[in-house]
Image (tube, grey):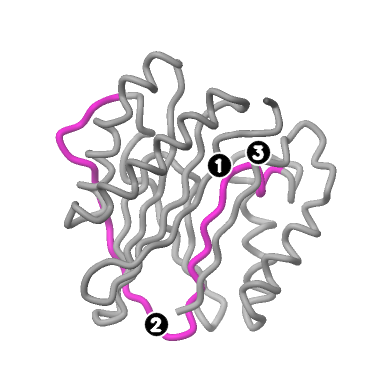
C-alpha cells in the first residue's frame, strides 16, 4: 500500500472555450490517501463543471469530502485554475497548495498564491480566488511539494526556487521536454520522498 498515495492532477474542458486545471495533494501516503484522492477526483468531475468560479468549486468539493477528511484525520491542498483564452485571463483558487507560477516569455514569473487554507481544516462560506492576465507563450507551472523537495533537497518555499529557476532557464523548450528534464534532475531515488509524491503540470498558452 505504500506504493500508492494522494497526489493528483486533472485537466478538463469548460464552457465557452475555457480550460480547467487542478492539482492536489492529500496529506500522508498509502491506502487512506489514495482513497481520499479517488473521492477528490470524483468530486472535481462533478463540481468543477457545475460551479461558475474556482472558489465556489473548492467550497463544494470541501463540503463533499469533509466527513472523510475528518474521519481519517487528513487534509487536502488543492489549486484549481481556469484558463480563459478569450479574455487572456487566468483565474485561480488555491487552498493551501504550493504556489503555482506563470512564467512569462521574458523569464519573469507571477506567483499564484494561496487564497484559503487546505480543505479539511476549517469550513468557510466562501473560498477566495484571484486572477491575472495571460499572454501567448506563457507557461503555467503547477507542482506538488515532493517534486521541489526532491529537486532541491530543501522543503518549503526555499525548495521552490531551484525548481522554478530550472523551468525559467528551459522556458523556450517544449513542455514535455522540460518536464522530462525536471524529473530526471530530481533523481530516481529521492531518499525519504516517496515516488508517488512528485507531480507537476506544465501548460503553454
Residue occupying the point 23% across, 42% down = 127
The alpha-carbon separation of the residues under discs 1 and 3 comes to: 17 Å
> Which residue corresponds to mark 2?
135
Which dot, 1 or 3, sits closer to the camera? 1
> Which residue corresponds to mark 1?
7
Q: Which residues are magenta?
A: 122-149
Marks counted in the figure total 3
**Relative height, residue 112 to residue 74 (above, below):** below
Relative placement, left or right, of 135 versus 124 is right
Residue occupying the point 24% across, 79% down = 87
Instruction: Answer with mark 1 or mark 3, whichever residue precedes in sequence.
Output: 1
Instruction: Answer with mark 2 or mark 1, whichever residue precedes in sequence.
Output: 1
Instruction: Answer with mark 2 or mark 3, whichever residue precedes in sequence.
Output: 2
Residue occupying the point 44% across, 79% down = 205
* Kind of element beneath mark 3: loop
The alpha-carbon separation of the residues under discs 2 and 3 comes to: 31 Å
* Kind of element beneath mark 1: strand
Which dot, 2 or 1, sits closer to the camera? 1
> Which residue corresponds to mark 3?
155
- Residue 12, given in percent of the width and then of the height, sits at 38, 63
Amino acid at each position: 500500500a505504500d506504493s500508492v498515495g494522494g497526489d493528483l492532477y486533472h485537466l478538463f474542458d469548460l464552457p465557452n472555450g475555457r480550460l480547467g486545471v487542478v492539482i492536489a495533494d492529500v496529506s500522508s501516503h498509502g491506502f487512506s490517501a489514495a482513497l481520499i484522492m479517488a473521492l477528490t477526483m470524483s468530486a472535481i468531475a462533478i463540481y468543477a463543471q457545475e460551479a461558475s468560479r474556482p472558489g465556489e468549486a473548492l467550497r463544494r468539493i470541501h463540503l463533499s469530502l469533509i466527513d472523510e477528511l475528518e474521519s481519517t484525520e487528513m487534509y487536502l491542498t488543492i489549486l484549481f485554475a481556469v484558463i480563459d483564452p478569450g479574455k487572456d485571463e487566468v483565474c485561480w483558487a488555491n487552498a493551501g497548495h504550493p504556489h503555482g507560477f506563470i512564467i512569462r516569455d521574458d523569464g519573469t514569473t507571477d506567483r499564484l498564491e494561496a487564497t484559503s487554507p487546505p480543505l479539511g481544516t476549517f469550513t468557510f462560506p466562501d473560498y477566495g480566488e484571484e486572477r491575472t492576465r495571460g499572454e501567448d507563450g506563457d507557461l503555467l507551472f503547477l507542482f506538488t511539494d515532493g517534486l521541489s523537495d526532491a529537486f532541491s533537497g530543501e522543503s518549503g518555499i526555499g525548495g521552490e526556487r531551484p525548481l522554478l529557476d530550472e523551468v525559467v532557464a528551459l522556458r523556450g523548450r517544449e513542455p514535455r521536454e522540460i518536464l522530462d528534464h525536471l524529473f530526471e534532475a530530481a533523481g530516481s531515488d529521492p531518499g525519504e520522498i516517496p515516488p508517488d509524491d512528485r507531480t507537476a503540470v506544465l501548460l503553454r498558452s
